[in-house]
Image (cartoon, rainbow, N blue to C red):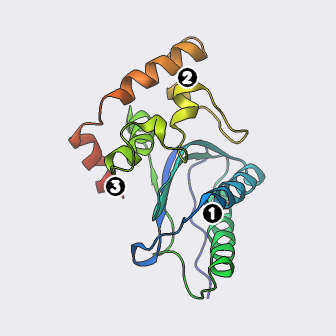
Amino acid sequence: MARPLRTFVPGESLHVYNRGNNRMAIFHDDIDYESFLLTMRRSTQRNGIAVHGMVLMTTHFHLMVTPTAEHVLSWAMKRIDESYARYYNAKYKRTGTLWEGRYQAVPMKEEGQTMICLRYIDQNPVRARMVKEPGAYRWSSYRTHAFGNAPTWWVPHPSYLELGRNDEERQKAYRAICAEPLPLDAILRVRRRQ
């Protein structure tokens, strides 16, 4: 029997993430990352989900999204997880589950949580010591927030828009706040919700 669809509050932002089974690598080369992003873009646009931030790490991914209806995130994530698993298993000639489990989606209800989540996501490659500064990592939304290199699927979050009166001010403000590591208590709050 299939699991029931999870419902989410339309217009409420969520931190969405999933990890490779047994912490295995789920991205090995540029084609893997691009394949996931293509599937994500198609599925979120088709289902009316605004994507505000993302990072694709070697073993997992994080997204910050806002769905427009109760079930659209469930439909989109089912398609993303299944499509990418089929692609991955065919490419690497393997069978079985790719994901550790069902994706997780944590609502952001508190004031300021969305900016903490965006920073958490965009600074993830630095914390993992993959790069020295977030702009050096290609597979995150940092360059979008900090320099305006926006892909077609990106929708700026209202709390990001509050950083300034125009794109230049917002990008400068975001670079400044991301120049400082996220405080440990903020990291722990995000991880406790995971």
Which residue is tagged 1?
32
Q: Is residue 149 above or below residue 34?
A: above
Residue 127 relative to residue 39: left or right: left
Identify the mark nearer the N-term, 2 or 3.
2
Q: In terms of secondary structure, where does tag 3 sit? A: helix
Q: Nearer the viewer, residue 107 or 179?
A: 179
Q: Is residue 132 above or below residue 23?
A: above
Which residue is tagged 2?
161
Residue 128 relative to residue 9: left or right: left
Q: Residue at x 71, y 51 (%)?
A: 41
Q: Position of residue 5 (x, y in %)?
A: 61, 69
Q: Position of residue 76 (x, y in %)?
A: 67, 61
Foreground label between 2 and 1? 1
Label 1: few (<14), some or many (≥20) within 10 Å?
A: some
Foreground label between 1 and 3? 1
Q: Is residue 50 visible?
A: yes
Q: In terms of secondary structure, where does tag 2 sit? A: helix
Identify the mark nearer the N-term, 2 or 1.
1
Q: Position of residue 3 (x, y in %)?
A: 58, 79
In the image as oriented, which residue stretches furthest toward the left? 185
Identify the mark nearer the N-term, 1 or 3.
1
Which residue is tagged 3?
193
Q: CA distance from mark 1 to mark 3?
A: 28 Å
Q: Is residue 77 above or below residue 108?
A: below
Q: Is mark 2 in CB contact (under 8 Å) with mark 3?
A: no
